[in-house]
Structure formats: structure tokens, C-alpha cells
Image (tube, rainbow, N blue to C red):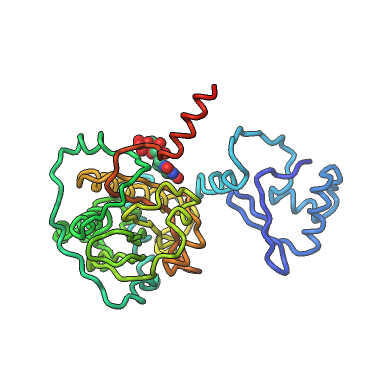
Amino acid sequence: MKINPNVFILPRTPNQIIWDYKNHKQFELNLEYSTRLAELIENPNNFNDSNEIDSKLFSAGILTNTKPTHTKWGWDELSKIFHIGTKNIPCDHVPQDIHEWSSLYLDHCTNVLNTSPPPTRLAESLARDLIALPLPSCLPVRPLASVLIDRKTCRTFTGEAVSLEIISTLLYLALGYLHERENEIDESIAEGLGARRSSPSGGGLNACEGFLHVQNVVGLKTGFYAYHPTMHALSFVNPLPDQPLGHLLSGQHFINNLPVGLFITCRFDKLWWKYEHSRAYRMAYIEAGHISQTFQLAATALGLNTWLTGALTDDQVEALLGLENSPEQVLFFVGCGKSDGQVMCKELKSLLTTQEQGQ
Ligand SMILES: Cc1cc2nc3c(=O)[nH]c(=O)nc-3n(C[C@H](O)[C@H](O)[C@H](O)COP(=O)(O)O)c2cc1C
């Protein structure tokens, strides 16, 4: 007898939840069952088929007599639990043709819309004194191919100020709700979910949002600002901390003088509202990736260089964005500014030169 290798245990006083993440099954064990399971984990050969608990654990699939197959995972256990646990999500019924799909999809949307929508975004409820951004005035007209070729990650920035017109255009193109698409009438879209961005959005929910990190933008005092796509406006959230930007980005201090950056967040409550399964978590990052790339392409087209990271000192960033204990969580950072185009900072370059000379 073996213990199913694809389970994890969660303490939920007074019981334990044992979660078979591959087969998407959860069982609640009381102390008697948990104790017996602990004994069998210590030695699965103690399995006794006349013991009622053993038989129930067996029929639940927590114990198994099939030899576990060892998939080469190449990563840690937590990533494996998440990835495998969000694979092959059971679907009560797979639609067999386009008519059935249409009918089931409509039912799903109707059911979702009959539940109360997630509350207003916290940053919106707290916003005082909105700073209206100028209309996006410098829409770049460079050929897409040359922008794609020019986009690259730079790690030295001059710190030079960026104009508010550029910030407005960048935010509009990356996160704004496009006025140009307001007249696209789509009867299937529920009220309040019609806004469209330049990047696609899971379920059309626009669950991703953004906060600007301002160090040198003409006409804006330094600090963190929430971006409000409906109004194309900013609201001040917090002043900058005493420590430099690199401190918030896992010590990547070569970025300390970046004039402006965007923390991309996601409203998990919005995603969960429409997609009640953990697989939707994957979509949050994919959506943030789209927004990040759009931001970088727009910045490149506007003559700036870009940098990006997912290595955030999350708790500190969240505190500064006013997102502590919020279902809106920070996922990614992308920034831009004038640069000499270097991929490496001079400090790293000089270390490499010293090493080469020593060889
Ligand atoms: C998801 C993701 C995370 C990244 N994180 C970092 C980072 O933490 N620090 C960094 O300097 N670059 C980071 N990069 C940039 C990559 O190092 C860079 O894209 C790669 O070296 C290719 O260079 P290019 O962007 O100039 O084409 C990241 C890129 C991606 C897509």
C-alpha cells in the first residue's frame, strides 16, 4: 500500500483537510481519521483492510495500491501543487456542439450576474482630489515592427524627467479604457463590463489595475498614485519611502533613478466572481504580462527605454500602495525612462572586467 503522492494537508481546526490536488478532491478528517492517516504515512504497510478507516481512506484514493508514476517536475513542490492542481479542472459537462456551448455559456454569465458583483476598488473609494490627466496627445506613429525590434530591457537610466503628456499617453495605451471602442455595441456584454483596453482581459473583467511610482515626472510630486482608467485620472496614495526604489524590487538598486514605473496589480475578487476555480490565478499573470508588454511597446514608441521585474518585496509594496489585506494584489513592475541603452549597470560591468583581467 502507498500514500497517494499528490495530496497535501491543511489544518482546519478541529479537523484536517486532505486535498488530492491531482484529482481535485478534498476530504475532511477528524482526529481519529487524521491519527490513523499519520500512522499509515509512517508505515503504509500497516494497512489493514478490516479496519474501517483504512478502507475508507483507500476508497477515497488517499491510499493506493498502484505504483506512483514519478513525473520529472524539475521545480519545487509548491509550484507542482499549484500547476498540477489547476490542470484538467473538472467540467460537469463538456459542450458537444456550438449550440450547447452558447446555451451553457449564457447560463454561466447569467448566474454570475445574478450574484453581487465585487465591491468598488479600494483605491477608487479612497480617492480624494483626482488629478485628471491631459488627453493622450502624443500617440506614437512609428511602425510596429521597428518598435518591436527596439524594445529591450535596459538597466541604466539617466533619471531625466518624463513629461505628463507622455505619462498620460502611456497609461491610456496600456491601461486606459479606450474611448475609441466605446461605440462597439456588443449585446452579450453586461452593464458595467463594456470597457475595453488595448490588451485583452480575462472574461473582459479588466481585473488588472495599476499604480504609478513617480520619481521624476513634470507636474507630479513624487509618490505613489492609483490610476483610474474610467476617468483617465490619478489619485495620490502615498509619498515615496526613505529607501530607494531598488529596496522594493528585491535589491535591484541599478534601477534607483528610474523616473517612473507602474506596479501592475490584480483584483482577485473580480476574477473569482466570474471564474470560481484556482485556474483563474494563471490568467491574472497572463493578463499582467499583456499589460506589461503593451506598456513597454508604447514607451519604446515614445522614445523611452524600459525595464521590468516580478521580483517585488511584496509586503512593503502593498503597504505603500494601500493594499494590505486586500483582494487586490501586486503582481509585476514595469518602468521606463531615458537611458543610454545599456543592458548592464556599470558596476556589474566593472566587476566582469576585473574578473576577466584576473583570468
Ligand atoms: C517575467 C519577467 C521577469 C523579469 N524579471 C527581471 C528582473 O527581475 N530583473 C531584470 O533586470 N530583468 C528582468 N526581466 C528582463 C529579462 O532579463 C529580459 O527580458 C531578458 O534578459 C531578455 O532581454 P530583452 O528584454 O532585452 O529582450 C524579466 C523579464 C520577464 C519577462
Quarter of the image with the C terminus in it: top right
Q: On the picture, is 25 further left or further right than 325?
A: right
In the foreground, 327 or 349: 349
Ligand 1's quadrant: top left
Q: Residue at x 84, y 52 (%)?
A: 39
158 versus 148 height, above or below: below
Q: Residue at x 67, y 52 (%)?
A: 8
Q: On the picture, is 131 further left or further right than 123?
A: left
Q: In x, y percent, where is residue 313?
A: 50, 56
Return the residue found at the far top: 359
Q: In x, y percent, where is residue 211?
A: 35, 62
Residue 300 visible? The answer is yes
| Rendered image quadrant of residue 234 | bottom left
Counting labels gives 0
Q: In x, y percent, where is residue 226?
A: 33, 66
In the foreground, 129 or 253: 253
Residue 190 visible? The answer is no
181 versus 224 height, above or below: above
Quarter of the image with the N terminus in it: top right
Q: In x, y percent, where is residue 242?
A: 45, 64
| Rendered image quadrant of residue 270 | bottom left
Q: On the picture, is 193 further left or further right than 34?
A: left
215 versus 250 height, above or below: below
Q: On the picture, is 173 further left or further right than 348?
A: left
Q: Residue at x 29, y 50 (%)?
A: 200
| Rendered image quadrant of residue 136 | bottom left
In the foreground, 301 or 32: 301
